[in-house]
Image (cartoon, rainbow, N blue to C red):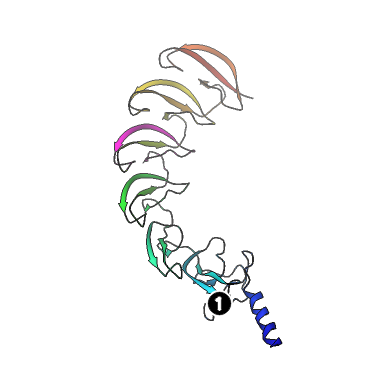
Amino acid sequence: MKSLLILGLATLSLCTPTPSNSSPVDPKDQEIGKRAEAESLTTGYWSCIIPKGAVYTKGQDVLNVCGSGFKKKYFVINPRDNLVSCFTHSSVENDLGVCGSTGFAKRYTLRKPADKIEACSVPSDFVFSSVRSTLNVCSTNGFAPIYTLRKPADKLEACSVPSDFVFSSVRSTLNVCSSNGFASIYTLRKPADNIDACSVPSGFTFTSAKKTLNVCNSNGFATIYRLRTPSVGLKACSIPRGWGSSSSERVLAVCSSTDFAMQYTLKKL
């Protein structure tokens, strides 16, 4: 009896949850063994924890294996394009007894973010060029939007403007950037010397400004600017950080579309 008690305590200590570098479950005998943290997740294995960067494709409740009582155990694997998993998604469905031992749980089709694919969310380094409402695709019980992802690029039309881009025009579209109504779509521009843009990004100046109708504003007048990269001796309408001016003067209808405004001759500080 004493030996059985010692054996039971040893088994329990092996199955107690540990930090993220704990030993995974061998898929053949489903017992926790020693694995190096760098072991490949290409084929997947059963584990009491989900390693950082991994997803799981199956889940089940086990008794006194991953801790005292019933605990979740996962089949963990590296994410890849079009993998059907229990995390993140481009489509989602409710499955019975797949991502959990009992009841329904959500299972997702993974997509590696790429230009022109449809996804249920927009990653931080992407924009979207259209959105539509879908039934039981991005939601298991009703309508939800799905987006056409685009990698930001110069002159691309997109429904949002990333922080490292500007836009040269905007227009209102119906059922393009909104699945149910009007919304703005923008022509993206990568900031560069001698382009027209609807704002002046950090690190640039401008040499002219003019009022335009339905260009930088989809329903009215707004100012568009001629961007310039700062250089010594350039006559500019603003002084970028790290620069100064050797002279200045008031000029008419150059730095303002209709009025007098200051123009500066740039010098490097």
Specify whether 143 is left or right of 224.
Answer: left
Residue at left 60%, top 67%? 38
Element marked by disc 1: loop
Q: Quick check: 214 above or below 68? A: above
| Residue 155 on the magenta span | yes
Q: Quadrant of the N terminus?
A: bottom right
Pick whichever, 122 or 251, lies toward us: 122
- Please state the horizontal and vertical placement of residue 118, each as a whole percent of the image: 36, 52
* Quarter in which the C terminus is drawn: top right
Q: Position of residue 166 (x, y in %)?
A: 44, 34
Question: At x 30% / y 38%, what residue is drawn?
Answer: 181
Q: Is residue 168 within the magenta segment?
A: yes
Quarter of the image where one finds residue 172: top left
Residue 46 relative to residue 95: left or right: right
Residue at far front of view: 1
Marker count (numbered): 1
Report the residue that reaches farthest toward the left.
174
Hey, what amino acid is under mark 1?
Asp
Q: Predominant secondary structure in magenta? A: loop
Range of residues picked out in magenta: 151-178
Neighbour tally class for label 1: few under 14, some 14-19, many 20 plus, Cα within 10 Å: some
Residue at the image position 66 percent from the left and 75 percent from the top: 13
Task: Please say if 81 is above or below 127.
Answer: below
Q: Residue furthest right?
A: 2
Residue 78 percent across, percent down from the top left? 50, 65
- The residue identified by callout 1 is 26
- Compared with 206, 124 (above or below) is below
